[in-house]
């Protein structure tokens, strides 16, 4: 209950305070190529239920039909403004809308696309009992995920066999002892204001 109250308060405040920035980013995305401002992709949320995540569009139109479900290195599908949004994580801000309606939380495992959720083992499916989030300890550890995948001979296999299982392990370990206070520290760590290794559960990451 406290976690939901935290999410509601900060999502409303965040949307109100950041509205001018959101409007400017939306204009920049629109002027890039005239396409849609937002990217609405189906992800799997709590209880295994699908929902559409909000993001500013950072790729060319029909990017999902032109390549992988994951982004690898200097992916040519990423637009000029999209690269800047990804590097600053501004493309994620619209997910405050997902938090507001209860589909996501500020802190929780990043929601996966259906094709990867289908590959979860039975123990890994325990992650679906959690509300997905905008950030988590796994996201902090894998800030440079795209670059890591670019170095792999088979990026898809590297993600499915190495990175995804490690992310699930980190998130399940954190969830076992998570609190509103530790969630706040994860947010600070995401912003570079607190060392993730000092967060209980962060050592495993």
Image (cartoon, rainbow, N blue to C red):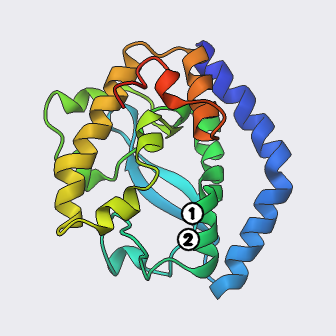
Q: Is residue 101 visible?
A: no
Residue in the foreground of this view, choosing between 26 and 201: 201
Q: Which mark is residue 58?
A: 2
The first of marks 1 and 2 along the sequence is 2
- Residue 120 in view here: yes
Compared across the picture, whether 70 is left or right of 8 comes to left
Q: Position of residue 24 (x, y in %)?
A: 80, 67
Viewer-nearest of discs 1 and 2 = 1
Asked if 115 appears above or below 76 in the picture, the reply is: above
Kindly identify which numbered label has been placed on residue 61: none
Q: Residue 52, how many percent across, how many down?
A: 48, 52
Q: Secondary structure at mark 1?
A: helix
Residue 105: x, y in percent? Answer: 55, 32
* Quadrant of residue 37 within the rendered picture: bottom right
Q: Is residue 66 above or below residue 205?
A: below
Q: Secondary structure at mark 2?
A: loop
The answer to whether the residues at label 1 and label 2 have Cβ atoms under 8 Å apart is: yes
Residue 95 or 173: which is nearer the viewer? 173
Image side of residue 157 versus residue 6, left or right:
left
Q: Residue at x 37, y 73 (%)?
A: 64
Q: Residue at x 30, y 70 (%)?
A: 68
Residue for badge 1: 86
Disc 1 from disc 2: Cα separation = 7 Å
């Amino acid at each position: 209950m406290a976690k939901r109250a935290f999410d509601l308060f900060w999502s409303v405040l965040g949307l109100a305070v950041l509205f001018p920035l959101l409007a400017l980013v939306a204009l920049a995305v629109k002027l890039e190529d005239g396409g849609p401002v937002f990217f609405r992709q189906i992800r799997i949320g709590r209880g295994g239920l699908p929902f559409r995540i909000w993001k500013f569009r950072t790729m060319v139109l029909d990017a999902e039909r032109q390549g992988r479900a994951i982004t690898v290195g200097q992916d040519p599908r990423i637009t000029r403004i999209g690269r800047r949004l990804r590097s600053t994580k501004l493309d994620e801000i619209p997910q405050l809308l997902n938090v507001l309606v209860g589909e996501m939380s500020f802190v929780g495992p990043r929601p996966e696309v259906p094709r990867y959720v289908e590959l979860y083992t039975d123990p890994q499916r325990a992650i679906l009992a959690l509300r997905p989030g905008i950030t988590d300890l796994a996201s902090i550890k894998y800030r440079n995920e795209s670059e890591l995948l670019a170095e792999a001979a088979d990026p898809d296999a590297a993600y499915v066999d190495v990175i995804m299982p490690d992310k699930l392990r980190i998130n399940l370990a954190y969830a076992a002892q998570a609190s509103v206070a530790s969630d706040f520290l994860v947010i600070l760590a995401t912003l570079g204001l607190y060392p993730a290794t000092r967060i209980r559960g962060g050592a495993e990451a």
